[in-house]
Amino acid sequence: MAAAGTLVAERRRQVAQRTAARRGKPSATRRKIQRQPAHAPAKRRTIRSSLAPAVGPPPVSYYVVATIVAVLTTLGLVMVLSASSVTSFHRGLSPWRYFSKQVMWSALGTIALVTTMRVPYQRWRNWVTPFLVICYVLMLLPFVPGLGVPVGGARAWVQLGPIGFQPSEFLKLAVLLYCADVLTKREDRMHIVRETLWPCLAVLVVSGMFMLAQGDLGSAVVLGALVLAVMFIGGAPLIPLAGVAGALGLTSLVFVLSTEYRRERWTAFLDLASTRENGGWQVWQSLVGIADGGITGVGVGASRAKWGYLPLAHSDFIFAIIAEELGLVGVVAVLGSFLLLAFFGVQIALAAADRFGMLLAGGVTAWLIVQTIINVGGVTGMMPLTGLTLPFLSFGGSSLLVTMTAMGLLLNVARSSSPAP
């Protein structure tokens, strides 16, 4: 109770300071600090900066999320090795090729996670606009001849020598930071749509146009869900928000119906029995592999689907390989881990020390869960295929790097929410 009271008092003090600043008057806390004599430095040092890390041990949610991230990343390395070795062998490459790349990206992701976890997350607000501009510049690279690489009907990848990455992954994080920053600065104007909803919507539209121009509708859908989630958590008016959601859904539908290839790809799941020889081939083979897994699976490395039957077994369809090799037990463990991440991500957002932390944690959680639902839904034939990776588990360097960076921010918010003893 004392810790809860301390947290409430701290939040009330922050609100009082913001209100006093808007009125042009110092708050009671600031007046008290100003009245302190110059010969009392020890007392001044007891007032903790809003950028300082929380005092005391992190909450349980911090350790749970950190453990799940470590377990899923490790499992992802194992499954990428299992699913990609055959593909590499068929292409005349080393069976360790994809695994080695994923290990490299996971190492970079670990560094990024530790960095974003240790640096006070409020400091990243100073870099929101430059980061967004850099990401927009990167989004132009796939259109540059010699740099852009078309994959699966989308031109969303960049190849710089031995390094390949997808700029849209970085753009998702940049848009999240931008929207959280805007809605934090304008907390007292959430009812004014043109000052809160429109800036976020403008960034979403520009970013979505880049993604659609690259043919990457899946990333655009995730980005739209992410921005809507942040605006909902921030307290945007529901009626305008619902209108925006409807407009985004209609735009996605028009884009899908604009070409025969997308139309067949996005509607194949509706009748797999008749589309299994063309547009529904991947999903059909995915379901065959999932069925072969049974309760306990056929064993790690013993999948038959990866032997040329299931394309992209190491990336988009890694969940099918997990189900085949680890069975229902592995599926429950993986999905249960994501459910725990969702639960504790919400708890972290609710316990955040400030509004920016709340929006950041809520946005990261929504991003992770929406992308997981879309990937698993597509692999199991319950939703259209989008080409999205399964977080932590699928092969994909930029996806893993950005996901671990975002999880570092989530862990940072969790650490900062720990009340002082």
Image (cartoon, rainbow, N blue to C red):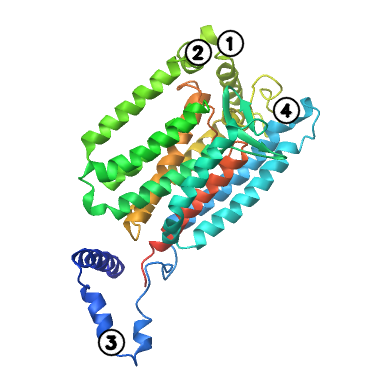
Name the N-terminal-most of marks 1 and 3. 3
Q: Considering only vertical position in the picture, is 314 above or below 287?
A: below
The mark total stands at: 4
Of tags 2 and 1, the one toward the viewer is 2
The Cα atoms of the two marked residues, 1 and 3, are separated by: 77 Å
The Cα atoms of the two marked residues, 2 and 4, are separated by: 26 Å
Residue identified by numbered label 1: 278
Residue identified by numbered label 3: 36
Name the N-terminal-most of marks 2 and 1. 2
Q: In terms of image quadrants, where is residue 153?
A: top right
**Decide: marks 1, 3 in contact (CB < 8 A)?**
no
Circle 1 Cα neighbour tier, 10 Å, few/some/many (<14 / 14–19 / ≥20): few
- The local secondary structure at tag 1 comes to loop
The Cα atoms of the two marked residues, 2 and 1, are separated by: 9 Å
Which label is found at residue 67?
A: none
Name the N-terminal-most of marks 2 and 3. 3
Q: Amino acid at mark 2?
A: Glu
Of tags 2 and 3, the one toward the viewer is 3
**Decide: marks 2, 1 in contact (CB < 8 A)?**
yes
Q: In terms of image quadrants, where is residue 191?
A: top left
